[in-house]
Image (spheres, helix red, strand yellow):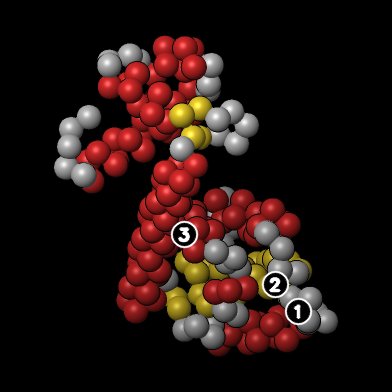
Amino acid sequence: MKKKCALYIRTTTAEQSGTQQRSELREYAKSRDFEITKIYEDKGVGPVRERPGIGKLLDDARNRQFEFVVMQTLDRMFCSHKHMFATLENLQHGGVGLIAVRDEIDTFSEKGGLITFLLMRFARFQEVINAERTMAGHLAMIEKRGYVGAYKKISREKITKLWEKGICQREIARRLSVGAATVSRVVGEFKIKTKREGTNP
């Protein structure tokens, strides 16, 4: 019995149509003796929400309407590391493999499985790095400005001093008339800072 596959095509604004991709992917499927069940197609380079083809593909993958997704290259489907990580997880949970013809990636092969694992690990690593950079930038801004919040200039020292006295975050927010999220963020940053300095808050 032939294995069922779906083709995914995305054309950019510089391309007139997906004819070339469609022809290349059909030839590949034929060479592997795959049965093409459906072709999903998106146009343009916009965000994921503007790519309905991907959404429909993932819905059908969850219903296991095919065993493989075949595309020309990885960047045809994925617009970021985060998107790639989430999509690969969804496909794997549904038992669906992914083949990027020109990238020579087949997630069900030994080599392709290793590459996919490394790509997913890299995506996770990138998320951690981005989070750390965001936190570092926020801390630097707080140190420079001396307050948090774009609309209410509340000194972070007032928040941290009250917290060091053992006053709960909810009460601090009430006393200073600021949001609980603001207090929680300042306290979290204070904990990180004191930990780096080797002190105990």
CB contact under 8 Å: marks 1 and 2 = yes
- Between disc 1 and disc 3, the foreground one is 3
The numbered dot on residue 18 is: 1
Measured along the vertical axis of the image, is residue 75 above or below residue 64?
A: below
How far apart in space, not on screen, are marks 1 and 2 (Cα)? 7 Å
Which residue appears at 21% of the width and 44% of the height? 197
Of residues 189 and 48, the one nearer the viewer is 189
Secondary structure category for the residue under label 3: helix
Of the numbered discs 1 and 3, the one sitting upstream in the chain is 1
Density class for disc 1 (Cα within 10 Å; few <14, some 14-19, many ≥20) is some
Of the numbered discs 1 and 2, the one sitting upstream in the chain is 2
Query: According to the image, label 3 marks what residue?
Result: 85
Query: According to the image, label 2 marks what residue?
Result: 10
Secondary structure category for the residue under label 1: loop
Instruction: State which quarter of the image contains the C terminus.
Output: top left
How far across and how far down the image is residue 190, in percent? 33, 35
Which residue appears at 38% of the width and 29% of the height? 157
Density class for disc 2 (Cα within 10 Å; few <14, some 14-19, many ≥20) is many
Measured along the vertical axis of the image, is residue 156 above or below residue 16?
A: above
How far apart in space, not on screen, are marks 1 and 3 (Cα)? 25 Å
How far across and how far down the image is residue 142, in percent? 45, 42
Asked whether residue 131 is in view, the answer is no
Secondary structure category for the residue under label 2: strand
